[in-house]
Amino acid sequence: MSAIPKRKLTAAEYLEIERIAEFRSEFFDGEMFAMAGATRAHNAVKENLILEIGMRMKGGPCQSFSSDQRVRIDLTGLYTYPDIVIVCGEPEYSVHDSNSLINPRIIIEVLSPSTQEYDRTTKFRNYMQLPSLQEYILASQNEPLISRYVRQPDGIWGLRMFHSLSETFSLATIPAEIPMADLYRNVTFPLTETVRDFTPEGNG
């Protein structure tokens, strides 16, 4: 006896559920995915990034949004909540949902053990479909390691890694330079083997 296939949700049904839900969920291809709880280290790295980048953008044309800001990728239908989103100029929102941002310039994700593979691959491939996106930043919570992907004029994403507390992390498309020691302030690293980062398939 064959199993009855699970009915997929429409985007409109997802948005209605999300509107009244106690906890946030992402949505892709008819399915909802609950957001996992964050560790103390994850929250510390995220808050340090928000504070330090926000200070350097003050008075400029760019503004940041925290993980409560939903983003929609129109070309793929993904609804997601990045840890940090930076928009330069006027924020634009989806015609399908006035609360879903569609024009981030920079997206920052703080990696968690349960989601880091998804953030580096499938999620990145979805984010690449945002015409406005110029930088994708992945910050480890387990070691002082930040991977900065920047869209080149030919569409290829170039990678630079910052991997020492003595280095200075910099954004490529807005004037912001931050000591790595400040970004990892109040973070205790576990004694685990370093995980090597990599460039997604087809992007150098």
Image (cartoon, helix red, strand yellow):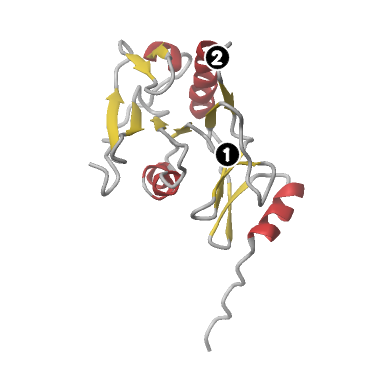
Type of amino acid at the residue the image marks with label 1: Gly
- Mark 1 Cα shell of 10 Å, populated few (<14), some (14-19), many (≥20): few
- Mark 2 Cα shell of 10 Å, populated few (<14), some (14-19), many (≥20): few
Q: How many marks?
A: 2
**Residue 173 rendering spot, x and y as whole percentages:** 40, 23
Q: Nearer the viewer, residue 8 or 22?
A: 8
Rendered-image quadrant of the C terminus: top left
SS at circle 1? loop
**CB under 8 Å between discs 1 and 2:** no
Left or right: 151 with respect to 86? left
**Residue 82 rendering spot, x and y as whole percentages:** 53, 37
Residue positioned most to the bottom: 1
Any part of residue 114 in sight: no
Rendered view: 62 above or below 39: above
Residue at left offset 73%, top offset 45%: 22
**Residue 20 rendering spot, x and y as whole percentages:** 77, 48
Q: Which residue is under mark 1?
A: 37
Residue at left offset 56%, top offset 43%: 36
Q: Quadrant of residue 3?
A: bottom right
Left or right: 87 with respect to 115? right
Any part of residue 138 in sight: yes
Nearer the observer: mark 1 or 2; the answer is 2
Left or right: 144 with respect to 174? left
SS at circle 2? loop
Q: CA distance from mark 1 to mark 2?
A: 33 Å
Type of amino acid at the residue the image marks with label 2: Gly
Rendered view: 20 above or below 90: below
Disc nearer the start of the sequence (1/2):
1
Q: Which residue is under mark 2?
A: 60
Residue at left offset 72%, top offset 54%: 17
